[in-house]
Image (spheres, coloured by chain):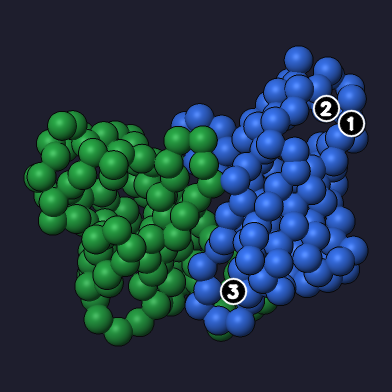
Chain colours: A blue, B green
Amino acid sequence: NAGVTQTPKFRVLKTGQSMTLLCAQDMNHEYMYWYRQDPGMGLRLIHYSVGEGTTAKGEVPDGYNVSRLKKQNFLLGLESAAPSQTSVYFCASTPGTGNDEQYFGPGTRLTVT
Amino acid sequence: AQSVAQPEDQVNVAEGNPLTVKCTYSVSGNPYLFWYVQYPNRGLQFLLKYITGDNLVKGSYGFEAEFNKSQTSFHLKKPSALVSDSALYFCAVREPLRWAGNNRKLIWGLGTSLAVNP
């Protein structure tokens, strides 16, 4: 199993450009999450999904949209990138069957200039 | 409101010495508690969790954590630190499902940077 994978690993955007980050998991997990990690601020939840076709807002959802059309994929979109969205983005998944831990992808480092 | 505190931004220990990384929490009901480790330029890796039972939980890489309900703490420990343990450590907490419903979100601490010196 590849676990949780993220595409791309690095990206540089200009302000106003759009992009989509892809998260894929091959563990048949129900729950998926998008976080951003910034120095001194820990992990902040952007959006999450409790199953195929569902999405919900986390603590910092503004400027981002998500979709979960297939159970194994969770897409994070930036419609009009801003320098404040420069961050490292992590995707995670969890089975959703009990007291389960989250499994993380390797991250995407995004710079918005 | 749920919260997690890691009171130390950085912990420095000498190789071979015991290490402790502190975590305190505030949640409704009995908490589910987790420790994760992040090595440089990597994603987070699960170390251990406490759900119920024995207050001393053993995890990966020789780490263990002690749940103390009266002090609302879940400190991470290792008897003998290695240079390779140098990393960022995160504590996280989740409410039991009967309180949180379908919400399995974790509440994260800000992380503690552990430096083990040779």
Which residue has dot 1 on it?
A18
Crowding near the residue tagged with mark 1, few <14, some 14–19, many ≥20 C-alpha atoms within 10 Å? few
> Quick check: marks 2 and 1 in contact, CB under 8 Å?
yes
Q: Nearer the viewer, mark 3 or mark 2?
A: 2
Residue A20 vertical placement versus B61 (above, below): above
Q: Amino acid type of disc 3?
A: Ala
Q: Are dots 3 and 1 in contact, CB under 8 Å? A: no
In the image, are marks 3 and 2 on the same chain? no
Whether residue B28 is visible, yes or no, is yes
Say whether residue B106 is left or right of residue A34: left
Identify the image quadrant of the C terminus of chain A.
top right
Q: Is residue B38 left or right of residue A86?
A: left
Give the number of the disc on residue A81.
Answer: 2
Given the image, on which type of amino acid does mark 2 rest? Answer: Ala
The x and y percentages for residue B66 are: 23, 66
Could you say which quadrant of the image residue B30 lies in? Answer: bottom left
* Circle 1: element type: loop
Q: Identify the residue at horizontal 43%, vertical 41% (top origin).
A: B39
Q: Is residue A88 above or below residue B109?
A: above
Residues at marks 2 and 1 on the same chain: yes
**Residue at 69%, 36% in the rendered image:** A9
Disc number placed over residue B34 in the picture, else none: none
Q: How many marks?
A: 3
**Mark 1 belongs to chain:** A
Q: Position of residue B28 (x, y in %)?
A: 46, 71
The CA span between labels 3 and 2 is 33 Å
Q: Which residue is mark 3?
A: B100
Badge 1 amino acid: Ser
